[in-house]
Image (cartoon, rainbow, N blue to C red):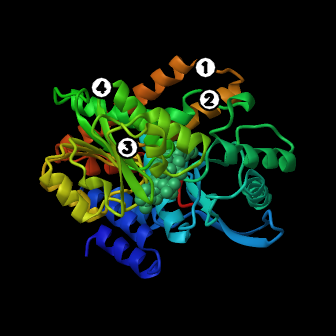
Amino acid sequence: MSYVEDILNDVKEKNQDQPEFIQAVNEILNSISVIFDEHKEFEENGVLERLVEPERVIMFRVPWVDDSGKINVNRGFRVQFNSAVGPYKGGLRFHPSVNISIMKFLAFEQIFKNSLTGMSIGGAKGGSDFNPKGRSDGEVMRFCQSFMNELFRHIGPDTDIPAGDMGVGGREVGYLFGQYKKLADVHVAVLTGAGLEYGGSLVRKEATGYGLIYILEEALKSREDTIKGKDIVVSGSGNVAIYAAQKAQKYGGNVLAMCDSEGYIYDKNGIDLSIVKEIKEVKRGRIKEYLDYSGKKSSAEYIQGEKIWNVPCEIALPCATQNELDVNSAKILAKNKTKYVAEGANMPSTNEAVDVFLKNKMIYLPGKAANAGGVATSAFEMAQRSSRIAWTFKEVDEKLKRIMINIYKNIDAVSKYYGYENNYVVGANITGFLKVANAMISQGIV
Ligand code: NDP
Ligand code: 2IT
């Protein structure tokens, strides 16, 4: 049995109740298996055995009182997966689906993504099964305070720096930071995605979506193609989706559809993002309200209970959640002659869907490369905060663009080097892995 097969069997055996984690490990290990013959040192140093086991997993009780006076208890997590390259870094997700499998897959992915950015940050993820939907600001604040009452002892500006993810945006980061400061009595960069008034960075809010479009445009440019004039479908209507759609429109793309977990809006004349922003960022409402704003004469339609991937497009941008794009959806994209798939979300395509993309010669940019702009800008936030110097929007945006172009160049070169031209699963995973593996070897068996 090969080294990779051996480790994979062990991971499956030990984590039988963690399908998303097994899926993420499977995807990465299978795609990097080509390097182990020429790099015996990885097996000799037990790199994979150590890599698939988190350095630390913290799970804790989060009790809080809702507006009616009822006591609620949620589960909190922080998975500190790997700190070989730098301090633990990764977002916090508040969503009812959160469990240990989802936390571990996200933290595992984050190791390679953070490595790809070229910044010195390790991989982590955290969150809770708390559902912020429909909760008042007061309830969200009390929840965040209780969550931080435990988390604060495990994080710090040089140990572990959380940020936002699904269900955690500026409001939540503010409440979390306020409680951290109260407990630790220091005003430091311990959470990124902070408000601009208290140390946050310009462009952080837009960074994941903008970064997605920057890397996509680079991939198209190198094929003498462009986003301009292309039909685009963006799933989700949250932080990543909104700013991906905004930048895609700026580049001349036609964003035809966006969704939330209940249904999607299709507008053949292009989505009006100011409406989506009003509904999602201001009102915290549902995407179906789009029709109330766009008026009776609008060409928009709302479709419920159907996958957004049924909408024909040349570019598909999954920006919602894991496994939202399955093998059937991938086949529909292939049938509709979609040329490019770039992932704003983490692991939105199942492994079987990815096989369909590659077999059909679509250009597929996996999330850990394509959505790395968010965490890269978080690292810029840390740099600005600790130096007490704030960069302009243009400065941060240019640095973000440079990082995304670099990621593309690196994964493209590595995929070619190993004889897998146009296969960015191989390109991204090997590139991300090599830095982490070498850092682990340099630091001994720890
Ligand atoms: P948000 O919470 O802002 O938005 C999530 C969006 O996805 C919402 O519109 C939500 O709809 C929708 N959604 C959730 N589940 C489903 C589903 N099953 N089907 C269809 N739509 C669904 O999160 P973000 O935009 O921050 O995150 C989106 C993805 O991007 C996640 O995978 C996250 O891990 C990843 N990511 C985020 C980064 C960041 O900086 N924020 C950085 C890199 C990656 P509803 O309101 O109905 O739940
Ligand atoms: O998945 C991700 O990369 C994020 N949610 C952002 C992490 C961060 O630390 O900015």
* Location of residue 338 in the rendering, given as x and y in whole percent from the top left corner: 18, 46
Question: Circle 3 — which element?
Answer: helix
Query: For mark 2, what is the residue?
Result: 201
Q: Of the residues under marks 3 and 4, which one precedes in the sequence?
A: 4
Q: Which residue is drawn at 35% across and 72% down?
A: 8
Q: Of the residues under marks 2 and 3, which one precedes in the sequence?
A: 2
Q: Do the residues labelled 1 and 2 touch (CB within 8 Å)?
A: yes
The CA span between labels 4 and 1 is 28 Å
Q: Is residue 158 visible?
A: no
Query: For mark 4, what is the residue?
Result: 252
Q: Is residue 174 visible?
A: yes
The quadrant where residue 309 appears: bottom left
Q: Which residue is drawn at 42% across and 45% down?
A: 435
- Which mark, by number, is residue 369? 3
Q: Which of 404 and 264 is in front in this view?
A: 264
- Which mark, by number, is residue 391? 1
Indicate the amino acid at tag 3: Ala
Q: Which of 154 and 229 is in front in this view?
A: 229
The CA span between labels 3 and 1 is 24 Å
Compared with 341, 400 (above or below) is above
- Which mark, by number, is residue 296? none
